[in-house]
Amino acid sequence: MRVDSTITVRCLLASLAGLLALTCVSTGQSRAASEIRPPTAIRFSFDRPIDASAAPFVLAASDGLFASEGLAVATDSAGGSPAAIARVAAGSSDFALVDINALIRFHDKPDAPPVKAVFVLFNQAPYAIIARKSRGIRALSDVEGKTLGVAEGDLSIGLWPALARQNGIRIARVKRNNFGAALREPMLSAGQVDAVTGFSYLSAVNLKDRGIPAQDLTVLRYADYGCEAYGFAVIVNPAFAAGKPEVVKGFLRAVIAGTQLAISEPERAADEVVSRMDGGSRDLELERLRTLIRDNILTGEVKRNGIGGVDPTRLDRSIDQIAEDFKFQKRPSVADIFDDRFLPALGGRLIN
């Protein structure tokens, strides 16, 4: 009888243990299922078709950096920075990559929606005058007496008056020829203008691809002549930022990690970019990427202070430079343009 009683007790204990185990497994599975959330959908706009400047975002997508932050990012392209800013202001895009100087002009009107930049990718604007030495231009002062080609929608021309004044150039002595964007490189290649305004990593590389010898090209970067402007920046819809601040922070962490990868692995980054282009050239995009990393992203300011932020005093001076040619109804302040609340601490923004 004692044996039977012992067996009975052991059986009862085993049954209870089994039930407890099943309950724990069931509870754990339910808890795990409740913690699995679908990724947050993000609508992101580039201000132009994809090229090498999109490398940080392309790598953030291809290497799962967005996914690791719980984000599902869908991208599209707008017809220029003003159009991309309008999409974010209207809420049809959550984020966009735009020229911060276009954002400054957007804030001209007192009733402009409070769209702000939250991350600066290009610490220096890529604005430049690209000229041919064979046309007598080797320095900025040589532009006087020459014909300068300006493409429709070109943003760099807006800071030309301030640049000219700073460097003692008489604008009245520089003839200006306006034309469509598609004619910029052909006009200079054919010698119909002596120089063109544009982006250093775009027009200069395009011209070499068109057969103009590199030794005949002069790239006069605005930043080398006193221009304070920042360049491409990530902007965010105000309502989205207010409602989902942690999502904004996660998006920027992924972009910073993607930028690190683009800097450390430019060849792979160029491959990924070209795979998303229609008829792109790997060699051209690799040259573009190396040029913009050197000239626009990895500047001395970024090496000291980390990527993504701004020097408020410098940004304020850049607004003054824009005001030399753009008559603001209401001059924006630095706080109207840039919000640093979503950036990681310095340790998370240093570029290795």
Image (cartoon, helix red, strand yellow):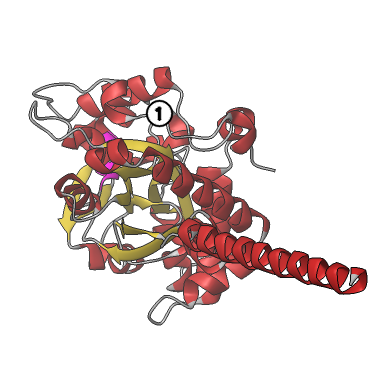
Which residue is rendered at x = 51% and y = 56% of the image?
Answer: 56
Is residue 240 toward the left or the right of residue 172 in the image? right
Quadrant where the image shows the N terminus = bottom right
Furthest residue to the bottom? 279
- The quadrant holding residue 233 is top left
Is residue 259 toward the left or the right of residue 39 in the image? right
Furthest residue to the front? 1
Query: Dot 1 corresponds to which residue?
Result: 228
Q: Position of residue 250 (x, y in %)?
A: 47, 46
- How many C-alpha atoms fall within 10 Å of the one at disc 1: few (<14), some, or many (≥20)? many
Answer whether residue 7 is visible to the viewer in this image. Answer: yes
Furthest residue to the right? 3
Q: Is residue 77 above or below residue 196?
A: below
Q: Position of residue 151 (x, y in %)?
A: 22, 56
Residue 38 part of the magenta segment? no
Helix or strand or loop: what does disc 1 sit on?
loop
Q: Position of residue 22 (x, y in %)?
A: 63, 68
Q: Is residue 327 above or below residue 99?
A: above
Magenta range: 155-160
Which residue is rendered at x = 42% and y = 73% of the image?
Answer: 210
Quadrant where the image shows the C terminus = top right
Amino acid type, residue under disc 1 in the picture: Glu
Is residue 170 toward the left or the right of residue 134 in the image? left
Q: Is residue 336 above or below residue 12?
A: above
Which residue is rendered at x = 30% and y = 43% of the image?
Answer: 236
Task: Please identify the dominant SS of the magenta region.
Answer: helix
Q: Position of residue 289 (x, y in %)?
A: 53, 59
> Is residue 145 or residue 49 the one in the foreground?
49
Answer whether residue 288 is visible to the viewer in this image. Answer: no
Is residue 11 toward the left or the right of residue 296 in the image? right
